[in-house]
Amino acid sequence: MDKNFFEDLQSRKITVKQYATKAKEYGWIDEQRMNDIINKLDNDTLVIGVIGQMKCGKSTFLNAFVFEDDILPAATTPMTAALSVITYGENKKVVAEFYTADEWAEQQMQAKRNLSEITNELEISKVKAAKELVEKSHLLGGAVSTYLGKIQEDTFENLIEYVGADGKYVSITKSVTIYYPKEYLKGVEIVDTPGFNDPIVSREERTKDFLKKADVVLLMLYAGRPFDATDRTILFQNVRSCGIGKVLVGVNKYDIPYESGELPEQIKQYVKDEIQKACADCNDSRLIDILQETTPILLSANMALLSEISMRKITTIEEYKKAWDRGCDIFEISNQNQFRECSHIDELTQAVKDMVEKEKGQILFAKPINSILAAGNKILEAKEKELKDCDAKIVVYSTPDEEIEEKQEILQKAIKRMNRKIASLEDTLDEEFENILRKTRNEMEDLVDATVKRLNQIVDNWGKLQDYENIKPKINNELDKLQTRDLKRCLEEQQNSAQRKLRSVLDDFFAEADEIIWKYLPDFDQKGFLNEVKKEIKLTVDKDLFKIELASQEEQSYGFWDFVGDFLSKTPFGMVGKAFSHNEKVCELKEAFNSISSQFDATEYLQTILQNKSTIINKVKEKYQTEFLLPIQNEFDELVVNADNKEKILAESKEKKESLSVARSKILEQIDEMDSILTV
């Protein structure tokens, strides 16, 4: 390290100390947080948080990037996903942290709840998770209590016992630290999070705690639906609230849209555009600056892993063999070097290594600065919300006595009108969704029937002297085309059409809702709030309406495509092998093909749209009824109860508003002063 860099580093440390001390003085952070930030200056460990939705391929990426083998299992459910920290160690080992006795008692209580009596989706997921964990705890027999609250060290070979779906300790494991002898892990911690909205509350809190410490986040997107509403929430709410030093964006499983005809540059440009759109709605200039410097990197972590593991393992494990054959077909390649090149793992690996080697100091400096500023902005936003609530109270309590009853009647009319509009919207959505479902189901079934017809034609043209292997590739191609292209494109086309229609329906509703508010409640300045409401509801429409991950075989539960796969794998040695004549073989195959039509059920892919319908209407009710009209109603009800103290409450509200305005201005001044520290 040269002298200039050392002096620069010392200058940065001084600046961060000043920043943290000043933030403590302002009340943005407490003393513990200030000390944590200052103490971190003497620890140059770079914490990289790998975040993303379930099944975006985080574990597969880490297997290819760090272990070069299938070490970390892909979490089959949110219940079995453990938070994992990977860092350098001279010797391979794992250190597991178990739930405390109180945390486990909470899981046991949750597990006893009756699912049929719960309607809230989040609560249902919590109870399901608790039931699964308690059931898996039977692997420990009666020894569960002896492990609770403890930290246990174990050999690396036993990692699966802590993170595997059927691991001995998975039921009570909250997090695992993996020590691994890779040079580039020195001074680095890579945190593999189980994801947000984790049904295990204590584990979700641990994920959030780690994110607060993360200097960098690697946001892993699923290429089939990159940067959807959930990804936006993760980045612009969870990450933003913690402050961050740098963001890397990986777009995993790009081979899926590539197989359907999308070019790599098109996929990257789409993600760039979506991030830009989201930035336009964000007032965090530091996060926007970080994202402006971020270029999405395409990746196929599964192909990268196939380039590392032994060919013997690939040929003996059916899942890997299918993935290998598929990769060879899509990219017209035939060896592991080509798999690695097509996977683009080296691009993401180099980006991570460059960041560690060249940007570490800048990132370690930016993280605490941005996290402190995020804390200040959080306080500012809270004050602004209080100001809006105070304004509403002043409007109500400023109403002359003779007008109170009239205002209440007007409010009731507004509520009734709004409720009727929401009910009408619900009816319209029911009708539109029914049309969407009917049209999509019919088109999907027609595609399946057309494929079966072509399959039967292939068999009709099968010469008596030909072996089954002569027609097998044609049969495979037809079924692969149906799964990976025809049905997927059908869903995408219908989804785009449905989204346009739903946006139009919602725009009509918003216009009518605005008219009601303008007509009946002109005194309430809620323009900013209502604009945010519209954006939030439209984001719900913009996410996937259907389940369209048809080509991702590794993510499917047993169903229609497993039946097709079993049929293909058994045909040469099963029904065809047992048939004694060519005609019998033809009949057996046609019977099997026709069963494909009869067993296909489009409902499997259409259920998510029904969930989205409920989400949209519930969001409208929550925002317009619960968060907008109900507080106004409550203010009037409170006014009636406190009629004798009306003038006093009005005076107190005005005084509070003045105090809040001063506090808001002070925070803005503090933010400006903090900025001046950085420019010195």
Image: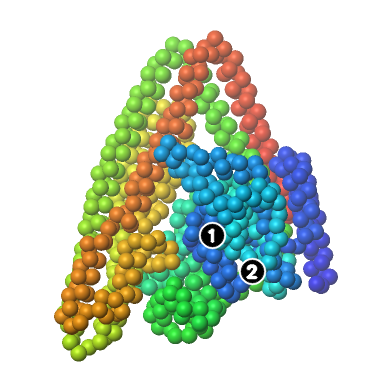
Quadrant of the frame with the N terminus: bottom right
At label 1, which amino acid type do we have?
Asp
Query: Can you give x and y, in whole percent of width and height, for residue 384 in the image?
Result: 58, 36
Q: Relative to the observer, which residue lies in front, 14 or 613?
A: 613
Where is mark 2, residue-wise?
Answer: 157
Q: Relative to the observer, which residue lies in front, 189 or 532?
A: 189
Can residue 607 be seen at all in this image of the molecule? yes
Query: Can you give x and y, in whole percent of width and height, for residue 229 in the image?
Result: 46, 52
Q: Is residue 75 left or right of residue 152?
A: left
At label 2, which amino acid type do we have?
Glu
Label 2 CA crowd tier, 10 Å (few <14, some 14–19, many 20+): few
Q: Decide: is 245 above or below 340.
A: above
Query: Can you give x and y, in whole percent of width and height, for residue 555 in the image?
Result: 43, 63
Among all residues in the image, which is located at the extreme bottom? 465
Where disc 1 sits, the SS reads loop
Where is mark 1, residue-wise?
Answer: 166
Quarter of image, res 591: bottom left
Label 1 CA crowd tier, 10 Å (few <14, some 14–19, many 20+): some
**Residue at horizontal 44 percent and vertical 85 percent from the top:** 334
Q: Relative to the observer, which residue lies in front, 371 or 588?
A: 588
Which label was assigned to residue 243? none
Q: Earlier in the sequence, mark 2 or mark 1?
A: 2
Q: Decide: is 56 above or below 384.
A: below
**Residue at horizontal 74 percent and vertical 46 percent from the top:** 33
Q: Is residue 161 left or right of residue 512?
A: right
Where disc 2 sits, the SS reads helix
Q: Decide: is 643 above or below 427.
A: above
